[in-house]
Image: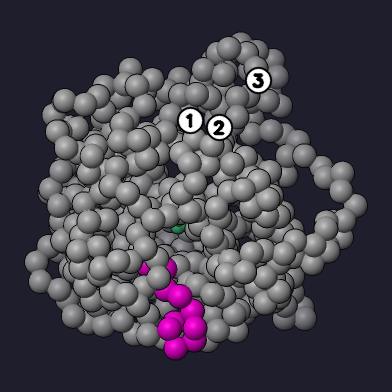
Amino acid sequence: MPSSETSRSPISFPAGFVWGTGTASYQIEGAVDEDGRGPSIWDTFSHQKGATHNGDTGDVACDHYHRVETDLELLGQLGVGSYRFSVAWPRVQPTGKGPVNQPGIDFYRRLVDGLRDRGIAPAVTLYHWDLPQPLEDAGGWTVRDTAERYAEYAWMVAGALGGDVALWTTLNEPWCSAWQGYGVGTQAPGRTDIDEAVAATHHLLLAHGLGVEAIRAAAGSVQVGITLNLTPVRPATDHPDDLAAARRVDGNQNRIFTEPIFRGRYPEDMFGHYPDLAPGGPLVQDGDLEQIRVPIDFLGVNFYFPKRAGAAGRPEAAASPELYLPWPNDPVAEHLGAVSVARGDVAQTTMGWEVEPGALTELLVGLRDQYGSVPVYVSENGAAFPDYVDQTGAVRDHDRIDYLDGHIRAVGAALAAGVDVRGYYVWSLLDNFEWAHGYKQRFGLVFVDYATQERLPKASFDWYRDIVAANGLPEEPV
Ligand code: GCO
């Protein structure tokens, strides 16, 4: 909605608030066949014809594997207190099981040491979607054994990196792994079976629960959590059919993850759609929900945009196209008799994601009201815009500055409402491989010239550096 503000008042954040930025292994590392790394499902998927924009793959990506020192220097210049990255399971266990591949662990040890040398707290995600292909060949997340293999992997890495890691995250966005990976096939492994997506949901959550215990067993009293991509789901209109559709989409997007993690149960209103999630069946076995509910030290929340859903096929939809702009990004809703829609009067990023910072405050306050005061990190927030290097050799990404400014203020509003927000991580440090979108979408604070691998800090890099240094936002004209 157009802002009525003429200026934005300064915001100071609490002492010790963590300012960070993040990346993920397959999206930046490259070196996919080096030092013993095995293939992941993303190596397989990205090489499938038509799977990604332009046939892009993560074979080289940002060549981070060979440019760690350069990227550590950028992090030092940015002055962030923390850097969130993920460990590639196939680098540590090339087949997903068996002995450690020492060069793989050594790579992450060097990265952690380099961060520590710069006073930057490492935040490690153990699974950001790059499942070893041999595990997928054996059923992937649709089979229970993968959860067991994950716990072994987690124990191995936690034992190697231990207390030098400030935040351990078991999984990044299990919704994407399960529903985009197994439900609608827009992500690796590219399967399209709702029952498989349901099974993957449960086995990923079971892996989370087993992983928390494995990390603590191996690394002692460290901070462990999970990162979920949660978002408010708005009804397209206040018609009862739209309200019901939005509730179903909310159940799929949010509650089949938050309810087991925080309450040890799946939401009953979703059992009609996902009967296998009912306890006592072959999927949810005795003890599973207690395992999933293992206490965590923090919740990572990845937020980008609010979802908007309506009932599929409502005749009024055709009569009011401005409310039901077809929004291709979420075929998941279709199996729930819903349609994801976008407003025609709200600014969007190049991903087609609506820009509505207030939805982040609404989300964070809602989570606190629902599940109590679990410490929260906004573990990802950022935007893709059509960045380019101008004739002066600069990338003047003021649209990203405006997006980040609005969402940092939204975090400030959640803090003012008493939500225990501990930190904020910009997605991403670098332009990188944006999954099925390939290299078309740029999210970085740093522009990457993929032909030369040169890094060029954008205007947002300098702007964010100043925010970090000031631990807050100065007055900004809108
Ligand atoms: C995700 C992933 C990131 C994405 C980012 C932009 O949230 O999908 O964690 O890997 O690149 O969110 O889509």
Asked if ligand 1 lies within 8 A of label 1, the reply is no
- The Cα–Cα distance between marks 3 and 2, rounded to whole angstroms, is 12 Å
Point out the stretch of residues depicted in magenta: 115-125
Residue in front for this viewpoint, 5 or 402: 5
Residue occupied by mark 3:
237
Q: Are marks 1 and 2 in contact (CB under 8 Å)?
A: yes
Q: Residue at x 70, y 19 (%)?
A: 320
Q: Residue furthest left?
A: 98
* Residue depicted at 14% across the width and 33% down the height: 286
Task: Return the x and y of residue 83 as percentages of the image width and height.
Answer: 48, 72
Which type of secondary structure does the marked residue at label 1 adopt?
helix
Neighbour tally class for label 1: few under 14, some 14-19, many 20 plus, Cα within 10 Å: many
Asked if the residue at label 3 sits under 8 Å from ligand 1, the reply is no
Q: Secondary structure at mark 3?
A: loop
Name the kind of residue labelled 3 in the image: Thr
Identify the disc placed on residue 233: 2
Instruction: Specify whether 324 is left or right of 74.
Output: right
- Closer to us: mark 1 or mark 3? 1
Look at mark 1 in the image and give the residue it sits on.
Answer: 250
